[in-house]
Amino acid sequence: MSLEDFLNYDDGTDARYELEDGRLLLMTSEGDRNQRIASFLLIYFAQLGISFYCLRIGLEIAVSGSRTTVRLPDLVVLTEELAQIMEGATRSIVMLDMPPPRLVVEVVSPGRENEERDYRYKRSQYQARGIAEYWIIDPIQEQITVLTLVAGLYEETVFSGDTAIASPLLSELGQASPLTAAQVLQLR
């Protein structure tokens, strides 16, 4: 399936899809914990001063690859420039000719396939797309992997338990009290 085919696809349902290497990939409903984590971060980022119009759930991102791929992350933080470009769009998708988002968050769902997709494939696609930060939140392994783009490649730091999450975005926002992995994973 081409990107154009994907953008025009309608199966008559409310089903959500990613386009992976030219194939439709049905996105199953998120578990309650995954939704709570994404909602928690959305509210947290808003409280830190990120404008509501830069925070998105349900935004699609076109990424490059050998075949057309469109990802549907759990949470996205847009740059001001990208938010302005998207204003009034008929579909909430970041196309390849647009600047990349500032941060993409994926909450890993159970299953080997989901782990592989979030840790391996999306990592390389978001890196190639030039996304400055990519957070992989893994409720099963009870850890958060923060990937920061440095000279075109992601550098990885893993956080768990009461360890404060270090991130360029969080540093820039100057949060009053540190955000810990346990808070995000809702372990306490």
Image (cartoon, grey):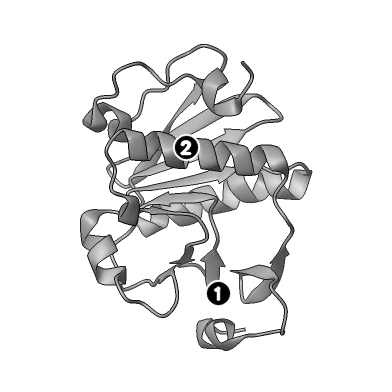
Q: Secondary structure at mark 2?
A: helix
Q: Which mark is residue 46?
A: none
**Closer-to-camera residue (38/170):** 38
Q: Look at the image and tell me whether residue 148 can be seen.
A: no
Instruction: Say whether residue 50 is visible.
Output: yes
Horizontal arrangement in the rendering, residue 9 relative to residue 162 (left or right): right
Q: Which residue position holds label 1?
A: 67
User: Tag 1, which secondary structure?
Assistant: loop
Rendering coords of residue 180 (x, y %): 47, 19
Q: Residue at x 56, y 19 (%)?
A: 182
The residue at 51%/24% (across/down) is: 158
Q: Measured along the vertical axis of the image, is residue 29 above or below residue 1? A: above
Q: In the rendered image of this protein, does residue 167 appear above or below residue 130?
A: above
In the picture, measured across the screen, residue 80 lies left or right of residue 155, that is left
Going by the numbered disc 1, the residue's amino acid type is: Arg
For this rendering, which residue is in front, 78 or 124?
A: 78
Q: Which residue is mark 2?
A: 41
Camera-near label (2 vs 1) is 2
Residue 124's spot in the image, x, y percent?
A: 49, 51
Q: Amino acid at mark 2?
A: Leu
Residue 94, position in %: x, y? 39, 68
Tell me what residue is drawn at x 27 percent, y 43 percent.
151
Distance Cα–Cα, label 2 vs label 1 = 32 Å
Q: Quadrant of the N terminus?
A: bottom right
Q: Residue at x 68, y 37 (%)?
A: 33
Indicate whether 151 appears above or below 142.
below
